[in-house]
Image (cartoon, helix red, strand yellow):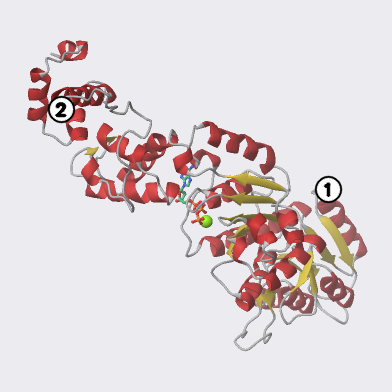
Amino acid sequence: MISGRMLIVDDNASLRESLTAVFLAEGFLVDQAEDGGLAIEKLEEHNYDVVITDIKMPKIGGIDVLKAAKKLNPSSVVVMMTGYGTVESAVEAMKHGASDYLQKPFSIEEMQLRVVNGLKIRHYEHELTYLRGERNIIYHFDNFIGESPSIKKVFAMLKKVSRSNASILITGETGTGKELVAGAIHYSSQRSSNSFVKVNCAALHDNLLESELFGHEKGAYTGAVKQRIGRFEQAHRGTLFLDEIGDMSLNTQAKVLRVIQEKEFERLGGGRTIKVDVRILSATNKDLAQAVQDKAFREDLYFRLNVITIKIPALRERKEDIPLLANYFLKKFAGDLKKNVRHISPGALSLLKRYQWPGNVRELENCLERAVLMCEGSEIKREDLFFMEDVEPAADGEGPALKIPPSGIKLKDMEKSLVVETLKMCNWVQKDAAEMLGISKRVMNYKVKQYNLSNPRWIKNK
Ligand SMILES: Nc1ncnc2c1ncn2[C@@H]1O[C@H](COP(=O)(O)OP(=O)(O)OP(=O)(O)O)[C@@H](O)[C@H]1O
Ligand SMILES: [Mg+2]
């Protein structure tokens, strides 16, 4: 975070040189200008993160440099240097958006501190704009739950690629965690201290999406009453997440392709070319390869975005993760809703495992939230669960199916096997098996006696 491109403006060559030496050593890319006119020329050429400028200079003064810097790049950090007796101009500078000022003579360390603070504040402001109005998800691989072999593969891949700068396309059905993964990639990358900026390409149409992405100048079109910084600019040195990329129009695709290839663009209605360094992550639940074939998606853009693909498997393809995720959400919502719900009954768990989860993890999360809310005791029961679609009948391969032998079977024998198999599934806990079979504990107890069933656990527990 604490680096970037810097412009140092002062007519005093030795001060310029010593500041340059220090900030170069810190990893900044430093340009110098000896007067206000030259400074403004440089500002028009490059995008500066930091401008350090003297206030009093012959001809064009520091306030004009400040105004130009802020106009061209409102998020730049401008630190003013004032001579003795120019404190009033320093106050004026602050009004025009300077981050800070220092009175000469100052120590170099003092200047370093002001620059670092200015950049930190800018960073937090970016984050804030991003988070405002958004769900505050903490993006971290630790929050990405799963132990199934297919999810482990995804993890292994993520570990390899997140530190690189490669563009990554994340695919998967709705609710599989594409956004969560994108955020986790950013926050574990070298860009983590810079912004993670997200755009939903499906939510906005052509012009609006372009203005969102590239920004616009005041008056670029009717309604553009103020200049606006686009998401590409906000994501400078960070990561831009193009969500639902499959819904972007061909027109906008062409423009995005150019930014990715040339690393530069213009704001709508603006002539100035802005250079950016942005890592692109994108996500879609559409089949982009098919969209390319159908000529609905540009092939060249597809290859640019798709340097690496991460496909997140649907939840029904990794049912092993269901109990883990369900318990994770149980804890989370019990905490959020301040309810003393601690377990999921085996019957409820078996239902969760049987369901197909068309809405994937998001649907499971919603299901658990509702269940915790509805739950009256400390355990979630099957009646606390609500599903969007029908749950498949039991015996989808997870337990022994009741096979009817060719010679037929007596209802009584069938019932006995059903009771025994259910008890096995529930670790011989009668209460749980009763719940699963939809009978009361008393009826279960009666069946156990009727069929003369026994298990060492029952004796031990007595
Ligand atoms: N493996 C996981 N561990 C924990 N939470 C998860 C996991 N996968 C998804 N989630 C949660 O499920 C919800 C949906 O995830 P997310 O928004 O990332 O899905 P998506 O793939 O982007 O969905 P869509 O295509 O509908 O936009 C989020 O609340 C997310 O935190
Ligand atoms: Mg999403």
Nearer to the camera, 109 or 313 = 313
In the rendered image, residue 446, in percent from the top left (x then y), is placed at 7, 24
Q: Please, is residue 228 above or below residue 371 in the view?
A: below
At x 54% / y 36%, what residue is drawn? Answer: 151
What numbered label is drawn on residue 340?
Answer: none
- Callout 2 amino acid: Leu
Q: Residue furthest front?
A: 407
Q: Please, is residue 419 above or below residue 282 in the view?
A: above
Of discs 2 and 1, which sits in the foreground? 2
In the rendered image, residue 343, in percent from the top left (x then y), is placed at 28, 34
Q: Residues within 10 Å of mark 2 (few under 14, many from 20)?
A: few
- Which image quarter holds the C terminus? top left
User: Where does label 1 land, which residue?
Assistant: 25
Instruction: Answer left or right for 67 relative to 283.
Output: right
Residue 226 in sight: yes
- The residue at label 1 has a CB less than 8 Å from ligand 1: no
* Mark 1: secondary structure: helix
User: Where does label 2 land, which residue?
Assistant: 411
In the rendered image, residue 66, in percent from the top left (x then y), is placed at 75, 74
- Callout 1 amino acid: Ala
Task: Say which label, 2 or 1, has the lower sequence index.
Answer: 1
